[in-house]
Image (tube, helix red, strand yellow):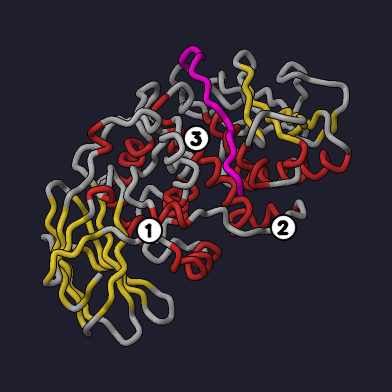
Amino acid sequence: MKALSLAVIPLWWAEIAAAPSRVLATPPAEFTPNIRVGPGGNQYKDSPHFRVYGASDSAANTVLQTLESAYDCFINGQGWRSTGLSFNQENDEGPWYKMNVYDVANLGANTAANTGTDSTAGLSFLNVVTQWMSTPSITVHEFGHAMTYAERYWINQGRTGAWWETVANFVADTFITSDVCAASRAKYNQPSGDTLMNLNKVISDSFQIIVDGSSGTGNYYEAWPFLTYITNNPDNIAGLGMANFPNVWRKYKRNSNETPLHILDQLVSPIKIQTVVDRYWARMAYVDLGHAKAKALYEKQKSQFNYANLDSLGGGAYRVKSARQPRYMGANIIPLRVTGTSISATVTATAPYTASLAIKASNGSVRYVEVVDNKAQASLASGEEASLVVVNTPNTLYLYDPFSLTSDVSRGLDYRVQLTGASV
């Protein structure tokens, strides 16, 4: 799909006061229209939680069903804060307003949709170019932005900025592919679809900072598989999982301008976020995330990925290429050519790191062997394949803005590997 310019996060609101404990109230079956949010209009069609302006009857029906389905999944089903509530409110007692969605002819080159806000009302609205009104990967992506606004505490926090796109694409893919939304899709007659995961970017450029907002080369639209790992939680880490995901907003330290990695570090304590990131990248070696469609896509595309991370020094020794040294919380995924019935890898590095062997059996199951004291060793059964995954996990969590990278997060991890029983 072509690159899209989507929501721009405004930074001009007054800061929101810290909220007390959530007050839960029963919302009405039909929310109240708010004709002052967005440009308004006389041609519209309603559903219980949305109003669509300017669309044909057919297009309005389509987008209303899609958005009601997404609302049912994430807000009714998973307990995310309602987009009908103002982000200026300190409680969840209402009133509740319908979200306005506008069918527009043009938003500029390569822009399919965007998310606008009314800072007085504390409500967001969606602008969607006519040809994309029936495309859930676009409309639910924008709804993901609206839910992030509704959750309030990332607003005006610049170091979360690029993560808004990461979250929105995670929301869209979860809606389209995941069993989490299966009942909601069925309720509103929404089909499942193919994954939006761009594995070529995620794996070939795994050395990049985990969320990188660099113009033209960054990964912030593609980095969302990390959130799939967080919510599917295949390693059963306490504090993670879909039920806990809203805590990335609700437990965010108010007006701290910390990164989402800082709040995740708190959620998984006493485990460190560095361990979580290491396990994510180890599982990305074979896309072992509990996402069947993504794993099938990996099997189809794996020969296309760029794994040229190391230079040979001879005698089974290798050194990471300078241009592909893992940056902050980035990784190298290194498929190994197995030459024996056991393999060992010794890693030496100039800075803190974590690393693992990922070993895939012929039946598709994957096991993991951590590098401990710079070394990992494993016996291999017939038909098993292996990859070494090395991750730049500094002891310090950096306060970094993905749109304005500093030298600490851009600094690569220089390391060497000594292999026996395998080669690169």
> Is residue 20 shown above or below 166?
above
In the image, which disc is placed on residue 164? Answer: 3
In the image, which is nearer the foreground, mark 1 or mark 2?
Answer: 2
Question: Picture coordinates of residue 8 (x, y %)?
Answer: 55, 27
At horizontal 67% and vertical 40% (from top left) the residue drawn is 139
Task: Please tell me whether the stretch drawn in magenta is mainly helix, strand or loop.
Answer: loop
Q: Which residue is mark 2?
A: 191
Q: Is residue 157 above or below residue 29?
A: above
Q: Residue at x 17, y 68 (%)?
A: 345
Residue placed under numbered mark 1 in the picture = 236
Quarter of the C terminus within the rendering: bottom left
Whether residue 80 is visible, yes or no, is yes
Q: Is residue 161 left or right of residue 70?
A: left
Q: Which residues are magenta?
A: 1-15
Point out the residue furthest to the bottom here.
Answer: 382
Q: Answer whether residue 51 is magenta in the image.
A: no
State the image coordinates of residue 288 (x, y, percent, origin top left). Answer: 42, 65
Q: Position of residue 181 (x, y in %)?
A: 62, 53
Query: Dot 3 surroundings within 10 Å: few (below 14), some, or many (20 or more)?
Result: many
**Disc 3 versus disc 1: distance between alpha carbons?**
25 Å
Residue 371 in the figure: left or right of residue 296: left
Q: Position of residue 233 (x, y in %)?
A: 42, 56
- Ranked by sequence position, the earlier of labels 3 and 2 is 3
Relative vertical location of residue 327 with respect to residue 362 in this rendering, above or below: above
Disc 3 and disc 1 in contact, CB within 8 angstroms: no
- How many neighbours does mark 2 have within 10 angstroms: few (below 14), some (14-19), or many (20 or more)? few
Q: Quadrant of residue 18?
A: top left
Circle 1: residue type: Asn
Asked whether, in this view, residue 272 is left or right of residue 196, the answer is left
Give the quadrant of residue 215: top left
Q: Secondary structure at mark 2?
A: loop
